[in-house]
Image: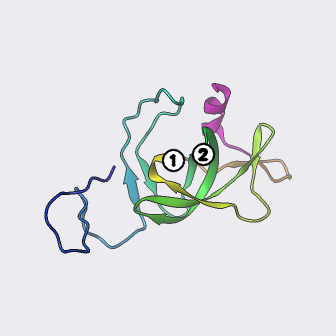
């Protein structure tokens, strides 16, 4: 979690506590407490956000697996998969959505393709969806 400092700075400067002042937006970490919240059964965890990583994003109390395509300090753009029964599929056209840091709930392994059809399993998401 990023925290703002209240120290006086130049008029257009924002200082983040614990920041290394690097200019690279390739990797960001979101500190979690590894405990499920009352709102969901997903344990929050330290999420490393970098282009190409697979994550689960939350939108309106639903969870969607996807792959990060762009990272910023306040979140990431994720190309999300759509549900197909108990499995998942990539949309024909990329479905890239910006999610805030608190909406990216966990990192996952790459989805596993089942058969020759374009259907995928996301094992890390099965337990979460079955408990809803």
Q: Which residues are magenta?
A: 120-132
Give the spatial CA distance, label 1 vs label 2.
7 Å
Residue occupying the point 77% across, 58% down: 91
Q: Secondary structure at mark 2?
A: strand
Residue at point 42% right, 59% down? 74
Residue at image mark 1: 103
Image quadrant in which you'd find residue 67? bottom right
Q: Residues within 10 Å of mark 2 (few under 14, many from 20)?
A: few
* Nearest to the observer: residue 10 or residue 1: 10
Going from N to C along the chain, the mark reached first, 1 or 2, is 2
- From the top left corner, tell me how far across and down residue 25 is, in percent: 40, 68
The residue lying at 26 percent from left, 74 percent from top is 12
Residue 27 location (% of width, % of height) = 41, 62
In the picture of the structure, the residue carrying the numbered disc 2 is 59
Q: Residue furthest left?
A: 8
| Disc 1: CA contacts within 10 A as few (<14), some (14-19) or many (>=20) | some
Q: Which mark is residue 38?
A: none
């Amino acid at each position: 979690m990023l925290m703002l400092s209240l120290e006086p700075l130049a008029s257009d400067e924002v200082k983040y506590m614990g920041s290394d002042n690097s200019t690279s937006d390739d990797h960001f970490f979101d500190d979690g407490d590894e405990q499920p919240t009352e709102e969901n059964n997903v344990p929050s965890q330290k999420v490393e956000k970098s282009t190409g990583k697979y994550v689960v994003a939350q939108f309106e109390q639903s969870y969607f697996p996807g792959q990060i395509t762009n990272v910023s300090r306040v979140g990431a753009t994720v190309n999300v998969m759509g549900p197909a029964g108990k499995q998942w599929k990539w949309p024909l056209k990329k479905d890239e959505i910006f999610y805030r840091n608190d909406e990216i709930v966990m990192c996952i392994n790459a989805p596993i393709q089942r058969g020759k059809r374009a259907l995928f399993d996301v094992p890390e998401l099965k337990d979460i969806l079955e408990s809803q």
